[in-house]
Image (cartoon, rainbow, N blue to C red):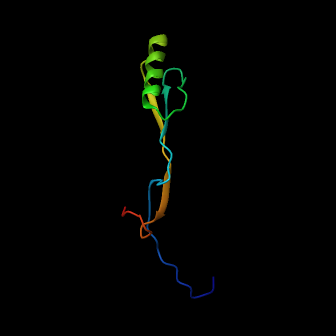
């Protein structure tokens, strides 16, 4: 960069990746830290937690979800305002 160059400020936004895979989730027991297999099927994760509760009596779980995101300048085609 040479002296006198002006750089503009660019606003960025982030949201779901347009080419994303389905969200991946798993349930994790908060009492013993066992967790369900990672899946895209919410019902399978819930079923694991219910079966775990039946076997152990544990009642508290955390649902962990992983979603693909995409960052881009607001003025880029498809961008949204923050």
Query: Going by the picture, which residue comes out furthest to the bottom?
Result: 4
Give x and y (percent) for residue 4: 57, 88
Looking at the image, residue 8 lies above or below residue 23: below
**Front residue of this view, candidates 49 and 20:** 20
Give x and y (percent) for residue 78: 41, 64
Looking at the image, residue 27 lies above or below residue 72: above
Query: Going by the picture, which residue comes out furthest to the right?
Result: 1
Residue beneath the point at 48% across and 63% down: 72
In-image side of 34 versus 2 (left or right): left
Residue beneath the point at 48% across and 21% down: 48
**Front residue of this view, candidates 4 and 42:** 42
The mark tally for this picture is 0
Image quadrant where residue 53 sits: top left
Query: Going by the picture, which residue comes out furthest to the left?
Result: 81
Give x and y (percent) for residue 73: 46, 67
In-image side of 50 versus 5 (left or right): left
Looking at the image, residue 56 lies above or below residue 42: above
In the picture, the quarter occupied by the N terminus is bottom right
Looking at the image, residue 76 lies above or below residue 41: below
Give x and y (percent) for residue 61: 44, 26
Residue beneath the point at 47% across and 27% down: 45
Residue beneath the point at 42% across and 70% down: 75
Image quadrant where residue 82 sits: bottom left
């Amino acid at each position: 960069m040479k002296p006198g160059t002006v750089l503009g400020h660019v606003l960025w936004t982030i949201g779901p990746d347009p080419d994303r895979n389905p969200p991946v989730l798993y349930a994790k027991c908060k009492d013993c830290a066992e967790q369900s297999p990672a899946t895209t099927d919410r019902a399978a994760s819930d079923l694991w937690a219910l079966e775990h509760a039946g076997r152990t009596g544990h009642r508290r779980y955390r649902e962990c979800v992983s979603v693909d995101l995409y960052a881009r300048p607001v003025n880029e085609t498809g961008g949204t305002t923050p």
